[in-house]
Every structure is written in C-alpha cells, then in structure tokens.
Amino acid sequence: MTGRAIVVGPYLRTRRGEAESADSGPVIRDIDARLEEITGLARAIDLTVVEAVPASIGQIRPATYLGKGKVEEIGALIPVHAVELVVMDCALSPIQQRNLEKAWNAKVLDRTGLILEIFGRRATTKEGALQVELAHLNYQRSRLVRSWTHLERQRGGFGFLGGPGETQIEADRRLIGERITKIESEIKKVAATRRLHRAGRKRVPYRIVALVGYTNAGKSTLFNRLTAAEVKAADMLFATLDPTLRAIRLPHGGKAMLSDTVGFISNLPTQLVAAFRATLEEVLEADVILHVRDISHEDAEAQQRDVDIVLRQLGIDPEAGAGVIEVWNKIDRFTPEERENLANIAARRPPDHPVCLVSAVTGEGLPALLAAIEDRLAASRATLSLEIDASDGAGISWLHRNTEVLAKHLHDGRFDMTVRVDATKRDIVAQRFGAREVGATASDRPPRSS
C-alpha cells in the first residue's frame, strides 16, 4: 500500500423543498462539509488523499452504488494518481464493494470500514481493543462474499479442520462466530467490573459528569482544562477512544467525577454503538451530561442532531433537558460582536435547556460552566443544617466523607454545619445527627439517634 487514496462522496440529491425529518437519520446537509469530514477520517489513518470527488446521485444502484458514468470517471483517475485505495463515504453492501474493486482494480473501503480502521488504531486499553474487535468481526462476517476463490473450496476433515463438505467460507464464518461469542463474554465481564466501580463511586459523595459530543468538538481539551489531566487532545477526528475519569473541584468546594467519552459522528456504525455500549453506560449513569459543541463549525446544528440521535439510541432524551447542559465551545474563534450575539441567543434559551459559552483553549467561560454544573447537581440534593460536638471526630469525619460540607462554624464546643447530601443518605444524616432541611424550624428537627 502506498497510502495514496481517492475519497468519493456519493450523496443522494434531495428534492426541492424536501425537509429532513427528525427520524430520517443523521445527515450533514453541506456537501463540502461532508467531503471535508470523510477526508479528515481518511487522514486519521495516515492516508494521503490525492483527490476528493463529490458524486451527486439520483438513486442508489444495487450493483455498484454509483452510476456507470461515475464509476468510469473515478476509474480513470486511479492510474493517473497511482491510487490503490478508494474511500466511499457511504455504507456499501458486500456485492457493491466487490464489484467496485473489480471495476477499479483497487481496494475499496466504505465509511463503516474506515471508522473501524480508525478505532482499531486508537484503542489503547484491553477494553477498547475488545470492543473494536467485536465490531470489526461483525462487519467482517457480512463481508465474506468476496471474489477470492479459496472461500468457495470444500474441504474434509474432523474437529477444527471442518466437517466433510464444509466450504472455506462456512469455516471462516464459524471461526468468526466462535471468536465473537468469546469476546462478547469478555465484554460482559468488563461491564460487570464497570458496574462494581460505579457502585463504589456511589458510596462516596462524588457525582458523575459526562462529556459527550461530536468528534473533534474539543471534549478532551475541555477535559484537560477542567481536570489538569493530560488526555490526548489533537485537532483530528477520534483523537481519543478510551474513557477517562478525573475529579473536578466545584466553586463551593464540592467535587465531581468528570468522564471523557468517545466522540460521536454522523452515520456512526451500528456495530460500534453496540460494541461500545459498556463504555457509553458511563453516560447513562451520569448525573449531568455536558453536550460539547464546536459552535464555530459550519454544520454545528447538523452535528447536534447527530449526537441527539445517538443519545436517544442509548435511552437519553436530550429534549427532556434533565441533566443536560449544552457547552458551546471554541468561542475564541469569533469576534467580540459575534460572541455577544451568541451570548444573546444562549440567554434566550429556557432554564431547563441551559447553554454555556466557553473556550477550552483559553479557559474563557469555564467558571460559569462549573457553576452551572454545581447548580444542576445541587437540584437533586437536599441541604441540611445540624449541630455536632467538636469532640465527635468520627461523626465529623463521616460527614466529610459522605456529604458535601458547605459551611462549618465552631462555637461553645460545637460545630454548626450546613451540608448537601444525596437523597440516598438524607435520612441517615437526619436520624444520626438530628439534621433538618435548611429553612425548617427547630421543632422540625428529627430526634437524634443514639
């Protein structure tokens, strides 16, 4: 392989006035932006893209996806540029892929295959590698309709050598199926381990804040800025895959755990959504979701729609608003007048759909973002006041471990404390320390347990 490639964008023409429905699937409307994105994906695996060819098509051809004229046009470019790989920005059937490879005498990779290649290179942990391999095997199993003649030969034998009359393609499918079963079993163990970790985190007063967003929206840069971590962040698609958790300190001294997750993309292969479900469960368990958007991108609205679709696949309704904060990132790319206009648009959003304008690069807007996170987390927690003897070191220590201490004042050998506590521990604090809701009268204080 020379690493030289042609990128082809075969996009269906839409009829005039035809609107895209919310259920029509993730579509980026601007053709130039689509070509730029698939070119970026190709470069993410170190391919040299010599030409990006848009192909407006009226209908999909069952045999080659493209029409005969466009197939011949692209075929003429391949020897001119000494290309060995053609990347198609669509999902090809095995037959279409085989026919195009025959017509062009070059390897053909569709969008799903390209994204799988990127994920295969970027996954660094055992968990990530397992998830990518599972997705890749499911993809390969459907690709065993190829032109290679060895797949059609029958062979005899016993046991693992294949039964009498078993064809090579049947043997390959069986081996892939066995490997898939084994990986699915290992991923279940990973999911169980993650559940144990989440259960452990629930025993301490740390809440989970998850970053989601379109790939290259700046999630990892924002993660590094908020946590002082060193997660890989680069101006490329899918720079990071493996989830990372770090603690962040909130304005009033509380803490939360921030989770960086894999970036989403339009037409994300269903195999990847299924394979990465164990990772994306961190999003399902999050108390607050930060939807990070590259607000400077020309297709920012379409990207938001793509992310919303994936969130719905996970069982999260972005329209419900509960626990979701939109983060409009990269405002450093705008002029002061444009920023003011964005701020006015954000201010008009309803309170249950808050927006924070930030620059992960410069740090602008991060204090307001942290305050918004704290407000969202506090909305589901009770604020209690209590008195405790200064000599009760065990009790004071327990409060610091299991609640968020907002205020603590010593007088006459006792501490007046104001704490914020999860609903799961509210009754424990109320009974053990005689705590009451802030604003309640002394007669409302429950009796303290001995």
Image (tube, rainbow, N blue to C red):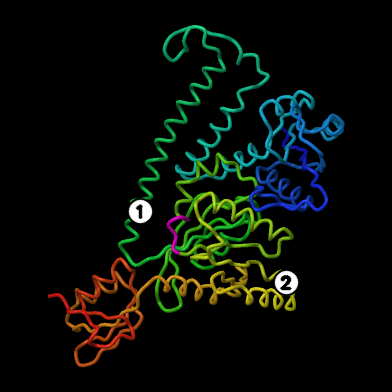
Residue 87 x/y as whole percent: 73, 37
Residue 237 x/y as whole percent: 64, 51
Question: Judging from the image, what secondary structure is the residue with disc 2 in?
Answer: loop
The CA distance from mark 2 to mark 1 is 41 Å
> Which residue is located at x 22 percent, y 87 percent?
443
- Quarter of the figure that contains the N terminus: top right
**Which quarter of the figure has residue 90?**
top right
Residue type beneath disc 1 = His
- Please check the rendered image and state whether residue 285 is part of the magenta-colored stretch, yes or no: yes
Whether tag 2 and tag 1 are in contact, CB under 8 A, the answer is no
Residue 378 x/y as whole percent: 42, 74
**Which quarter of the figure has residue 4?**
top right
> Which residue is located at x 48 percent, y 7 percent?
164
Name the N-terminal-most of marks 2 and 1.
Answer: 1
Q: Which mark is residue 334?
A: 2
Residue at the left extreme?
Answer: 450
- The magenta span reads 283-287
| Residue picked out by circle 1 | 197
Label 1 CA crowd tier, 10 Å (few <14, some 14–19, many 20+): few
Label 2 CA crowd tier, 10 Å (few <14, some 14–19, many 20+): few
Q: Which mark is residue 378?
A: none
